Each structure stands twice: as structure tokens, then as C-alpha cells.
Image: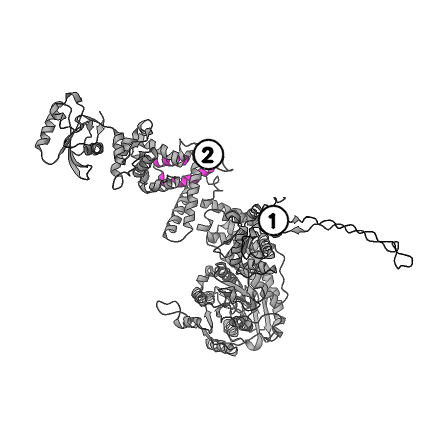
Amino acid sequence: MPEVDQRVITGLLTTRLARTKGRRLLLVHGKYAAGGPEEFSVPVGDGTRRKVRVTHTTSVLGLTDAWQAHLAAEGADLLVVTTDVPGERISLDLLGEMVRSQIIAVDEADIVKQLFGAADLDPRMRRDPWLWLPAALIDAEADASQGGWPQYGAVLTLDAAMRALVGVRLGLEGLFEGGASVDVDALLAWSRTPGGPERLAVLSEAERRGITEWLAQSAGEAASVLLRLALQGRGPEATALGVLASVMTGDTASADAAVALGSVFGLGSRPSELRAYARAVSGTLTRWIGEASGRGPQSEEARQWVVDVLHQADRLADNAHLTAALAGNPFLPSGFQARLHGLADALSEGPQAAQAAWEHVVEHQLAAVLYPKRVELARMAVRLLRWLEAPEPAVSSVGQAVSAHVADWGWVDRALAQLWVGDGETEPVLAQAYRAVHDAARRRRALLDKAFAAQLGPWVQRATAAQPGGALPIEDVLRTIALPLAKVRPPLVLVLNGMSSAVAAQLGEELTGAGRWSELSSDGQRAAAVATIPSVTVISRATLLCGRPVSGGQSVEKDGFTAFWKQHRHAAVLFHKSEIPGPDGQLLDPRLVAAIASDDVVGVVLNTIGESLDHGQRSALADWSVSRVKYLAELLNSARGQGRPVVLVSDHGHVLDRTKVEVRPPAAEGVESARWRTGAEAGEGEIALSGPRVLENDGRVTVPWSEEIRYTPRKAGYHGGAALAEMTVPVLVLAPSAELAPAEWSELPRESIQPSWWEAETPSAPVPTPVRPAKRAAQAKPKPRPQEGELFADDAVKVPAAAPPAEPAMLTLGQQILDTTIYKHQRKFVRKSPEHKVVASVIDALDHAGGTLSLAAVAAAAIGSGGRTNTRPEGLVTVLTRLLNIEGYEVISLIDSRTRVRLNRETLREQFELPEESV
């Protein structure tokens, strides 16, 4: 006799009462579940509800007594009696009161159809192995969302029923909205929810087995492994265990690893299931890491989840003695460490091995999300290694040296500073490898400082503003750089006190890399000036702002700045530290904002870098982003909003204190500052300078060229000496648009600013294709023999033999494309397409650069072709996409926030049907 509960009775009544009027007795074959409610209400077809009383009896007399008691009672209007009495023993008077005049057999399928509003059920639900499903659906309906099961109208399919059941039983209702299918992603998230796995564990064995098998069919083999783990109470570590399962995949799989993994997962998991599970977890982690790369609370939550899971995986791997087998795993933190150790070994093997090892580090899934600083630190070591492998640099003059320092050696200083500071987490083996590279580069840099000092001594004795000896004196920066800009639009002159070439390299890279600023130049390179001697603020900054050699404080700078621009018929105003911040609620002083909005030349002095040398910590001096220079971002935004160009300039550079704690200042005569003194006798690492460029002590001082010397107590950094990092004044000219460039000026491509060793060479040399040989020229007819008396005869002068045919010319990739029928046909459909030489030049420039160039470099290639380019660089690339991106295939595109251009060489050759390249 089947057990009947409230849900079954409700289903039976709901399906029958709508078609039965006036009947108040329902006999059901079965036994009412113990503990079930004796009274409740059920819905009927017209939207109302009827009160029900339920009882159980095993005899005819009991049926009669129950009915009589029901008639005498008040409240319920419908009696349901569960019984095993045969129908033929029921009296006629009871038959007249009974719904359908018979004992109702429980048909779970009919109840399910009614609950889902379905016309019929999938036939599979009426036979093994799905006979358990209707009862489970009836039982779970009470937990369905408000309104009960979804209504189908047509046939209720097995998958639809399972989606409904799994959604309720496991708490995954939202997953199946719109008919979506389950995947391992959702199950992994479910396995980590409090109480999630327990919801599966409490189900009957038949239902639990059925749900597990259906999920395995829907989500793949991985679901079986996951659900087994969940049932074992290991749901919170299921994702981490999936990382360990990767030892079953790839070339590193071994029998020992498989045995160790088996001990972790226990019996019941086949190798194919574990491999599928590892792949599924890998996909899930990759997606979560992608989400963690963003910003906002959701990204932070994803980042924390990833960190927790992968640290948990590392602990499990250690416990199972699988750490070594998982060293190549792209997710585990221990795998990232292993890759860094590989880099440490490769640094001693040369730049190519080190670059390959660094790329392997970058490929780790956590590199960009959790370890960007460590990745960048490793990159700096590889960059310095490439510089050390380059030919030995030389110093030929002061002007050449400061230009080379801005263009090349200052980038070395930038990398050196980062390696010297480190990241606080570097392990000893890696720190030692970095230190070896750092020290080798420092030794080479010291030689450059020494060579520069040798050139500086004679230069200082004769150099003046009128005869600078091939260098740009700092007092001429406004005249030669800012003044031409003012003829187009008055500039904002930002003086970053103490900005070295290393700092300028990082700031320039950030500002131009975002695509908001273009860097301009009058001669195709970043400008560099020479500071005064000694290279201290009171002299060098005043000289810069006044346009003449002078010493003085803020009042001298203000008056001199105004006088200089007035001399050139421009109004000007200069703001210092206390005049920059605005009142509460405003970032900048309203007077400064108004000045930038006017047509005056505006100067602003920012002291952040200089003050950091005096008070900052060592770790703060190796990384100078725009946001770290107080007020810089706000001033740049204000200038951009007003369409102003910006001259970002220093008054002098600086050196960092790299000496050991126990090193004290040397005993020296006439100490005036940290890096200069009046004593005449120069010691090791010093030079005595005298001449018109020396503006202290009546034109004669002694200064160190070695960065290791300081005369005063320790600070984070110093200035005033004769090292290249102090004497070089970097000048960056930035504009919101290249259209603000003065006549004969141009935009500096990013590729021309970075030194060649900064990025690894990725040449994609074009494969030249021979041009079809020209038709052979007709053979010349033999000349008639000269007549007697002629000056020359055949036997007097040998007639040179016909020259052998020249080697066929080789076509570049761009020329090959232009020669194809497909390109000629495509060109007909593009209005105002660029000249052939422009298209070929851009393709070839991208090809030679390995496929990627900045917009400025693409524009330079177009201009260098000699063809007409009447559009802005971005417009040129847009036209090229119409020419080259046939049928939507991405041959050429804008990337990195539309600041760089990428060429897909393989797709280009395929789309234009070029022959395969020979190897």
C-alpha cells in the first residue's frame, strides 16, 4: 500500500475537484503519512480554496464512521480517506458522495502533469531508470519558487523536469532561466556555497544517483568527479583539487603523480574523468582571473576567491607531495615561483634565454593579476641584460652625452632603480641573480659618468649661452622649445623639481601610451638640456625660468619668468607650491584654473620629486607614475581641456643613495651641499670645475661625478653633482593633438623614444619575392667594320660582352600586396584610398616591427613614403582597414585603446592569396 502525503493529496484534489461538483468525499488507495496535517486547504479551478480533512482507515465500518463524523463536524467541507478497502465493499450511500464514485489510485505522473500544467510527460519518466523522478518532483514542489513549478502547456520533457528539480534541490534555480544548461562553472561555485553540497547529500539514494548521472550527461565527465567530492564533504576544496588533477594532463604526467593523485581523490575516479575535471577547473579559473583583472567590488571578490583557491591548492599539493609534479602549472603560486627561479638561471645564459624565461613567467595566469610588480622587476633585469650585450657606449661631447642619457642611459637608470629597490618578496636566489645584473650595469654606467666628467671639465671653461659648444643650456629651454609652441598656442610649462631622465622616461611612457597626449619634437628626438653648475635648485631652476644664468628664490623666478615672456610679447604667470591647491571642494586654486583658461603662458613648479629625495623612503623613488606627482594629473587634465600644449621639464636631475648604511660622508673641505663643495683639490670620483657655467664660489667648485659620494648626512637622494643623472635636464613636449605642433615640428613615434634594447626584438623580416624577369632586349645588330682611315677598328678596341642579366629585384610584403589582383579589385570599392606607396610603406613598417607600431610611427611611415596623407593617423588606419580587412577578417586593427596598430601578417598573406613562404 503506497504512502500518501499532503503533496500527493493536494495534487489529486487539484486535478479532480475542478471537474467534480457537489462531491465531498475522496477515497484514496494508500496510507496517509504519519505526522501529516489532518486539516489543510487546497486550490480549486476557480481560484478559490477548499478546506480538507484527512484520515486513514482499514475497514468499511471505519469509512462509515469517518464520514458520519465529518458530517457532524464544522469547518472542513471535504473529507479525504486513505484506505486499502476494496471498492466492491463500499456501500451505495458512500458511493454517491465520493469523487468519481470510486477509490482513486495514486498516479504520480498525473499529479506531475497537473503541477507543471503539461499535456503529457516524456515517456522516459514512466520507466527505469527515471521512475523515481515523478515522486521527487511532487515532493520538491513545496520548495519551488512562489507560484510552484513553471507551466509548460505541452509535453514536459525529461531535461525540463530535471532542470526544475536540480534548480530546487541544489539551489540553482537562477541558473536555468531561459532554458540554459548547467556547466561545471556553476557547479564549482555551488560546491563552495555554505550548505550547497549538503542539499545533495540528504536526498534519497535513487534521487541522488539520478541527479548525479543527469548532471554528468549535461556538464560532462567533470561533473561526476565534482559531485562525488561534494558528497564526501569536500566541496569547499573541489576547485583546488581540480588544479591538482592537472598532473594527469600534458607531457609531465607520470605514474608516480597518478598514484599520488589517486590517494587524494580516492576510489571511483577514472583517469579520463580526472583529465576532464582538470580541464574544466582550468577554464573556470581562467574566467575568474579575467574578471579579477577588472576594477570594482566584484573584481576584488573574484581576486580574493582566486587567491584563496590557489593557495589552498598549493597546500593540498604539498600534503600530497605533488608540488614538484605541478611546477609547470600555470595557476599555482608555487608554479609562478618556479618560473621565476627558471628566470634566475637564464639570466646567466644571455639575453635570448632570459627573454624566453621572462615570457614564460608572463604566461602564468596569475602574473598580471597578482604579481605585476614582480613581473615588471624581472622584465627590468632582462632589459638591462640586453643593454649589457649591446656595443659599449661612448661619450664624445657634453651635448652628445646628455642627449644619449635622455634617449638611452636614463632608461638604464630607470631599470637600475627598480632592481635596486626590489619588491620586498624576492627570494634569495632571484635577488642574487638580479644583483649580478644590477652591479654589472652599474659598473658600465659609472664609466659613462666618468667619461662625461672628462668632457664636462673643458666644456665648462669655455661654454656660454652664446657659444654652448653643441649642447642646449638650461637657460635656452624656454627660447628654443616653449617659444615656438607659444606661436601656435601658449603652453603650460610644468617644472618638476629634480625630475631625472629615468623619471621622465616613465612619465612620458605613461602619458603617451594612453593615447591622450602626443609628444612633439623639432628634430625627431626628445630634447635634453644641461643644468647649471652646481646642479642645485636655487641656481638651475631660476636660470631655467628666467632664460638667463641667475641665482635666486621664488621671487626671482616669478619676475624673471614674466620678464622673459614679456620680452617676447606674451603675458605670463608663474605658480609655486603654496599657490597650487584650491579651497575645500576644489583641487586647484581658482586663479590657476583661470590662468590656464586664458591666453597667458602659465608656469607651475611641482616639488614632489625633490621633496621625496629629502624625506621619501627608498622604495618610493624607483617608480614614478603620473598619480604620484602631486597635482600633475589635475594640471594635465586642465591643460588638455583648454587645448594647451605642455612643456614638462626639470631644473636638474638627481641620484639615489645606494650606499650601505655604515658608509659615512668623506672628510671634505668647503662642503656647501650634499653634492658640491668649494675645496679645490679633487679626490677620487670628483672633478674640479671652473668657468662661466659655474655660478657659485666665483666660478670654481668641486663636485662628484660618482654617484657614491655625498658630503652630508644620508637622505633618499641628492643633486648638485656632475653625474649624468644630475646634469641632464629632460624636456618633454606634450600636446592634446599633433595639430598643435609648430611648423617643421612633428609627432615623436613611441618607437623612436624608447631605446632599441628596451623591448625584445621581434623582427618579422619580409620574405622578398623575385620580380618576374623583364623580356630580354633584342640582340643588337653587329656594327659594320670601320672603313679605312676611320679612327677605330674592331681589332683596335674590344667590344664589351653583353652584361649578364641583373638579379631580379625583390619585392617587399607591401609591394607584393599591391601587385595582387585582389588588392586592385578591393581598391575600387574604397573611396579616397591612400596612394600605393603609402599603403606599401605602412605594411612594410608594421612587418619590420613585428606587426605592431604606435599610431605616430604609422603616420611617420606614411609621410616617409613621399605619398600624400591628408588624414590623421587614426583616419588613415580606418581607410586601411577597408582596404585590407576583406570579408571582416582582421588583417589590420587598432589596439591598446586605439593607440597602436597591429598587422596580422599570416591573415594578410592568406586573404591576398600570396604563395606560402619558404623556410
- Residue 857 magenta: no
Q: Which residue is mark 2?
A: 258
Across and down, in percent, residue 701 comes to 57, 73
Across and down, in percent, residue 409 comes to 57, 61
Number of numbered labels in the structure image: 2
Q: Which residue is at the far top? A: 88
Q: Is residue 745 left or right of residue 22?
A: right
Q: Judge the density around disc 2: few (<14), some (14-19), many (≥20) Cα neighbours within 10 Å.
A: some
Choose between 624 and 702: the one closer to the eye.
624
Secondary structure at numbered mark 1: loop
Dividing the image into 4 quarters, which one contains the N terminus? top left
Q: Which residue is at the far right? A: 788
Choose between 280 and 758: the one closer to the eye.
280
Across and down, in percent, residue 507 comes to 49, 62
Dividing the image into 4 quarters, which one contains the C terminus? top right
Q: Is residue 20 left or right of residue 248?
A: left
Residue 793, picture quadrant: bottom right
- Most frequent secondary structure within the magenta stretch: helix
- Residue 242 magenta: yes
Q: Judge the density around disc 1: few (<14), some (14-19), many (≥20) Cα neighbours within 10 Å.
A: few
Q: How is the image coloured?
A: one colour
Amino acid at dot 2: Ala
Residue 384, picture quadrant: bottom right
Residue 533: tell me if it is visible. Answer: no
Amino acid at dot 1: Thr
Choose between 337 and 295: the one closer to the eye.
295
Magenta span: 220-249
Q: State the CA–CA distance, disc 2 to disc 1.
A: 55 Å
Q: Which residue is mark 1?
A: 820
Rendered position, 826 above or below 206 = below
